[in-house]
Amino acid sequence: MTKSSLPAAPQHGAARHFRQRAQFQAVLSTAALVHTAHFALHGIPAAAMAGSPVAPLFPGDGPWLGAVVPKRWARRAVTRTSLKRQIYAAEREHPLPAGAWVVRLKRAFSTADFPSATSVALRRAARDELRQLLGPRLRQRLAIGANLPRPSAP
């Protein structure tokens, strides 16, 4: 990886975004740490990453964040883009600890409840779940510290 292919340093405490398939694969190979009705958070805390084979995939200090919104669960591109924006915005509100993190959409939002792909109601519902996912639930899970994922070779 060349220096120019690395993402720029984040501003205002925001996490750097994943750019390579290997980064997603390394984090998604671990079990989900926290779940909500529609989202799951996979992650490798910085302490678990130190000295592991995945450490070169995430250079520098601070958090790395990836968002996975499959077409299977969000058919329209505008919905997928809107949900990714909500994920990154929620991370700016609730900064993640150092490490590598992936938020994955694991279930579709009901089109009966949210007929518009970019409705305010859908954005609000997604943001509320993401606040739960990145806020107290994650902090409690990390405080327990037991059985945190150990990365393996990609």
Image: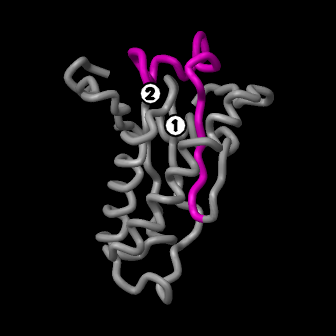
The foreground one among 68 and 40 is 40
Classify residue 22 as left or right of residue 119.
Answer: right
How crowded is the residue under tag 1: few (<14 C-alpha within 10 Å), some, or many (20+)?
many
Q: Is residue 36 above or below residue 134?
A: below
Query: x%, y% of residue 43?
Result: 59, 35
Q: On the image, numbered disc 2 is attached to which residue?
A: 63
Contact (Cβ within 8 Å) of mark 1 with mark 2? yes
Give SS at disc 2.
strand
Instruction: Judge whether residue 5 is colored magenta.
Output: no
Considering the image in quadrants, where does the C terminus appear? top right
Name the kind of residue labelled 1 in the image: Trp
What residue appears at the point 79 percent right and 27 percent down from the top-left corner? 146
The image's mark for residue 80 is none
Instruction: Judge whether residue 45 is colored magenta.
Output: yes
Classify residue 29 as left or right of residue 111.
Answer: right
The foreground one among 149 and 135 is 135
Residue lying farthest bottom? 112
Give the number of marks. Answer: 2
| C-alpha span from label 1 to label 2 | 7 Å
Name the kind of residue labelled 2 in the image: Pro
What residue appears at the point 62 percent right and 39 percent down from the top-left corner? 138
What residue appears at the point 37 percent right and 56 percent down from the top-left corner? 86
What residue appears at the point 59 percent right and 25 percent down from the top-left corner? 45
Residue lying farthest top? 51
Q: Earlier in the sequence, mark 1 or mark 2?
A: 2
Query: x%, y% of residue 102?
Result: 51, 43
Magenta-tinted stretch: 38-62
Classify residue 107 as left or right of residue 69.
Answer: right
How crowded is the residue under tag 2: few (<14 C-alpha within 10 Å), some, or many (20+)?
many
Q: On the image, numbered disc 1 is attached to which residue?
A: 101
Q: Is residue 72 above or below residue 3?
A: below
